[in-house]
């Protein structure tokens, strides 16, 4: 492709609205343009990168035995009513009414549509198992669309849905997809990790998120340095602790004045104790029901764990007014002793002795409080966030907290949708059973953004070869010099003959601009034809990733590039 003919509008200035590096570089590099909030046009370079990801996804999904379909984006409300999600999905679902007053929505995901299709078309165990996938635009009316392709309202997803006869078959397919996702992200040239994710009510480890490791990721993940354990923060388990020695004497519990000391830091400093010797009492609203949660002073509540314990879907922290309304105590002085609402405690609290708590009275705390003697709780569970001080729940090894970008998610659905939509097949006895389902998503457009978050420097993008829009960029630095231009053209033709994807910068621009743009758009290999060809008969190959350069004759350069690219593409 000739640069002079390509819609590649690079920008010198960094657009003010772009907060993260992938967003900045995708805009500056002329890959995408914003139409409206969270909705982007893909320009040729942006689309080329997306197509690369799609191609890898398709090849691996097909190899895994899945079949490609393309489902409608417009979905009838009645189907969503059948699954119960018309009511449950909330404002992320973009709903509208057509000229016949029929209610519809734009698909944020396709469980309903695929289950409807399969219940109509597949009736016998003989036609199972089946795994159907599509690569398609999704619409989610995200509350905060941001970071460009990272969190759009409209974005491209690969979604797959499997239908199996029983749990065993469904779990085998889950493992098949787990392996397939590993191959996909490896082939994309990304550093990633599969982490255990929360399954809500399903339980077991039948949900994994695939996280591209990048400091700028929105998600925190927990990785064991000593074994393969990895989980996201919602799911990361805390290793159960041993009981403290029985010999710890229980001291007398006393009320002490703590004037104006509401925060853990202020209270513990005032009392001359460590935050590890204080228990916080925090009020949450779980599906609108108030619940007080006890955690050690230096720990944080994990709301998803709390929701799972209580069987609640929406869990949020109560604000000061709500806390006062349900307890009659101002925030900062709440404590478990004498509190009238439901009380649950993190397991760690069970191991504590002689700790401080709020006295349920403004400006007072209790010291040397003890669970069982001074107060009781309704339930005890693992309710807190893991910290780097914790040890691995599997091997007791060292944990590390790191940042990731969720690019894929696999989930064993079980029969929740097939039951809701009454989707059944007949077994060999003619008996009907509900399909056992799984669903498997990849944020295709987000993968491109994640690849950039992980691979860039101050000058621009450093695309991993497998997802780069072009493999080589040729810079002709002597447009007015016949010999230089001829050999640049020759190299361009020769590389194309080798089926290498080439961007040929044939613009009438200064070398400085060409170099800058090349660094910005991040094509993995740069081939420069300039004065050195006129003087020494050599051209220069430079690798974007490490700046390594070599000078070769034009013929050798073509051979060398072809062999380097082939080797790199086939090593993944
Ligand atoms: P998130 O927690 O980031 O909102 P999700 O859990 O809602 O993601 P899924 O429903 O599992 O996402 O969707 C599958 C994949 O689609 C995600 O792993 C992610 O890569 C991608 N994705 C989800 N929402 C968006 C979005 N708003 N913009 C771009 N990609 C997205
Ligand atoms: Mg989401």
Image: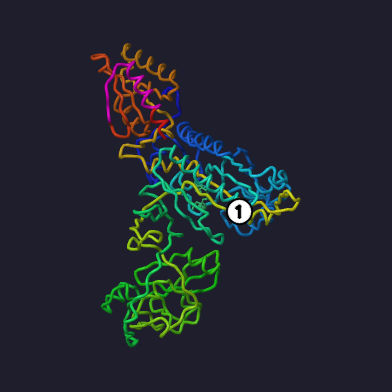
Which quarter of the picture shows residue 448?
A: top left
Q: Residue furthest top?
A: 482
Label 1 sits on a secondary structure element that is helix
Which quarter of the picture shows residue 349?
A: bottom left
Q: Position of residue 116 (x, y in %)?
A: 69, 48
Q: Position of residue 234 (x, y in %)?
A: 45, 60
Name the residue rendered at 34%, 76% in the picture: 244
Q: Residue furthest front?
A: 429
Q: Main secondary structure of the magenta part?
A: helix
Q: Position of residue 113 (x, y in %)?
A: 65, 47
Q: Nearer the viewer, residue 232 or 484?
A: 232
Q: Residue furthest left?
A: 535
Name the residue rendered at 68%, 53% in the picture: 434
Q: Nearer the viewer, residue 215 or 89?
A: 215
- Residue 39 visible? The answer is yes
- Residue at which label 1 appears: 167
Q: Is 463 displayed left or right of 61 in the figure?
A: left
State yes or no: residue 551 in magenta.
yes
* Quadrant where the C terminus is found in the figure: top left
- In the image, residue 404 sits, relative to residue 366, either above or below, namely above
* Quadrant where the N terminus is found in the figure: top left
Magenta segment boundaries in residue numbering: 548-566
Colour option used? rainbow
- In the image, residue 308 sits, relative to residue 155, either above or below, namely below
- In the image, residue 280 sits, relative to residue 461, either above or below, namely below
């Amino acid at each position: 492709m000739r640069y002079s003919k390509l819609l590649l509008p690079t920008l010198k200035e960094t657009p003010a609205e772009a907060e993260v590096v992938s967003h900045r570089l995708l805009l500056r590099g002329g890959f995408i343009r914003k139409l409206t909030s969270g909705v982007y046009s893909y320009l040729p370079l942006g689309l080329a990168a997306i197509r690369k990801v799609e191609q890898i996804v398709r090849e691996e999904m097909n190899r895994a035995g899945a079949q490609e379909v393309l489902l409608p984006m417009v979905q009838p409300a009645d189907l969503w009513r059948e699954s119960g999600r018309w009511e449950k999905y909330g404002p992320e679902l973009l709903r509208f009414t057509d000229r016949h007053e029929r209610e519809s929505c734009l698909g944020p995901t396709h469980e309903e549509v695929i289950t409807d299709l399969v219940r109509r078309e597949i009736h016998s165990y003989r036609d199972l198992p089946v795994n159907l996938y599509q690569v398609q635009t999704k619409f989610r009316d995200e509350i905060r669309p941001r970071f460009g392709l990272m969190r759009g309202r409209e974005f491209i997803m690969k979604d797959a849905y499997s239908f199996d006869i029983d749990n065993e078959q469904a779990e085998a397919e889950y493992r098949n997809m787990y392996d397939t996702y590993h191959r996909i992200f490896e082939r994309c040239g990304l550093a990633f990790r599969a982490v255990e994710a929360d399954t809500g009510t399903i339980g077991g480890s039948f949900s994994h998120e695939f996280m591209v490791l990048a400091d700028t990721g929105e998600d925190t993940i927990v990785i064991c340095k000593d074994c393969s354990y990895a989980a996201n923060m919602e799911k990361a388990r805390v290793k159960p602790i041993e009981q403290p020695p029985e010999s710890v004497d229980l001291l007398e519990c006393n009320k002490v004045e703590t004037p104006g000391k509401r925060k853990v830091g202020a209270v513990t400093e005032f009392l001359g104790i460590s935050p590890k010797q204080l228990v916080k009492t925090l009020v949450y609203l779980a599906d609108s029901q108030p619940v007080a949660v006890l955690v050690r002073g230096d720990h944080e509540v994990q709301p998803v764990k709390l929701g799972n314990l209580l069987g609640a879907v929406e869990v949020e922290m109560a604000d000061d007014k709500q806390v006062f309304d349900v307890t009659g105590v101002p925030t900062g002085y709440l404590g478990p002793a004498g509190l009238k609402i439901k009380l649950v405690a993190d397991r760690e609290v069970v191991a504590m002795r002689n700790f401080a708590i709020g006295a349920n009275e403004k400006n007072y705390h209790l010291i040397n409080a003890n669970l069982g003697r001074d107060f009781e709780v309704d339930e005890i569970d693992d309710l807190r966030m893991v910290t780097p001080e914790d040890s691995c729940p599997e091997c007791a090894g060292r944990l590390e907290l790191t940042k990731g970008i969720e690019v894929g998610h696999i989930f064993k659905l079980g029969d929740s949708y097939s039951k809701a939509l009454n989707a059944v097949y007949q077994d060999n006895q003619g008996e009907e059973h509900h399909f056992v389902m799984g669903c498997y998503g990849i944020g295709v457009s987000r993968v491109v953004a994640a690849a950039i978050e992980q691979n860039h420097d101050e000058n621009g993008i450093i695309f991993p070869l497998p997802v780069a829009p072009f493999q080589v960029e040729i810079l002709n630095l002597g447009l007015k010099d016949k010999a230089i231009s001829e050999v640049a053209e020759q190299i361009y033709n020769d590389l194309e003959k080798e089926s290498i994807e080439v961007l040929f910068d044939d613009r009438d621009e200064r070398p400085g601009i060409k170099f800058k743009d090349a660094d910005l758009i991040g094509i993995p290999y740069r081939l420069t034809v300039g004065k050195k060809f006129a003087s020494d008969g050599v051209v220069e190959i430079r690798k974007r990733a490490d700046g390594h350069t070599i000078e070769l004759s034009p013929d050798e350069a073509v051979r060398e590039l072809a062999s380097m690219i082939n080797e790199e593409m086939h090593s993944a």
